[in-house]
Amino acid sequence: MSNILIELARNNRLGHFYRLIPPNNSLTPKAEIELFFENFIQSYAQEIEKTELTHGQQHEDILILDQEEKKSLTVDEDFEELNKFLMHKPLRFKRKILFIPDSTKLTVSFANKCLKIFEEPHGNLLILLGQMSEHLLETIKSRSQEIKLKPSSPATNTLGIRLSELSSLSLSQFIEKFSKLPDEIDEIVTALLQREAQQKSNAAKKEKILLLIKKLNEMDLYHQPAATKLTLIYDLLNSDERR
């Protein structure tokens, strides 16, 4: 689906505001949205801006409003950060990109404060909002276009093949390989959870997956993979392959 946005950008037909809707019944809707954005921004940088992005590195023309420790975005702190971001023209890209992964953090006051930005973006601005709930202000829906994300199929894509290959690695080899590749770990986790979601008959396994998700979130997996986190993934991967 990110290819659609790339094609629109290539033809200079890219809109200014899109809502990203995760697949139905996804166990990890936010991870799906974040993975879509990561794939899009990498493709956009390479194909449209003709440059490379380093994973985890801040970029002057990209703002991600998503404070994990916060339950909601605030008018004072977060809107001020957004205003500062919009004050200047793009520095390295042709446009600025605002990504809000979780729509549930949009309070009514914050959303109302942003309505003018959503309707009439400052300069060349692209806004991507992860719609994590059906409950969203109609004023936001009316100002944006909808993109429904499609779940990947681990059983048929190349990632599915790699999952089975990874089971041959020892724990030390697995940690050594992926401790330096946070993007790869994100893909593995997403693929495993998607596969488990398709196997609804195994309630005990699903419960184990849900507990793992909670534990991994607490350990901030998607930012700083460490040996303890990778060990949890390794154990899940191998129990999954042995079934």
Image (cartoon, rainbow, N blue to C red):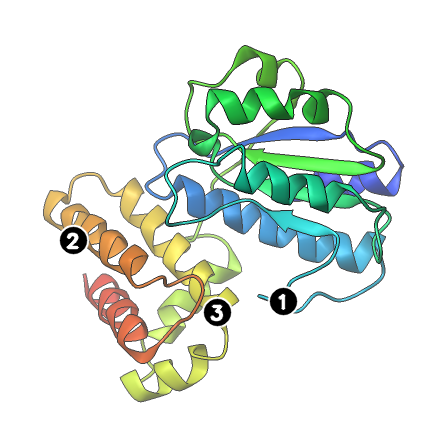
Residue sticking out furthest to the left = 204
Q: Is residue 203 left or right of residue 1?
A: left
Q: Is residue 44 left or right of residue 32?
A: right
Comparing labels 3 and 1, the label whose residue is closer to the camera: 1
Q: Secondary structure at mark 1?
A: loop
Mark closest to the chain's N terminus, 3 or 2: 3
Residue at 34% across, 55% down = 192
Q: Is 15 placed above or below 53 here?
A: above
What residue did someone put label 3 on?
Answer: 182
Q: Secondary structure at mark 3?
A: helix
Q: CA distance from mark 2 to mark 1?
A: 33 Å
Comparing labels 2 and 1, the label whose residue is closer to the camera: 1
**What percent of the width, then of the height, locates residue 150?**
52, 37
What residue did someone put label 1 on?
Answer: 57
Q: What amino acid is at disc 3?
A: Pro
Residue at 77% across, 45% down = 96
Q: Is residue 72 left or right of residue 200?
A: right
Q: What amino acid is at disc 2?
A: Lys
Tell me, yes or no, whether the two marked residues, 3 and 1, touch with CB atoms within 8 Å.
Answer: no
Q: What amino acid is at disc 1?
A: Gln
Q: Nearer the viewer, residue 79 or 2?
A: 79
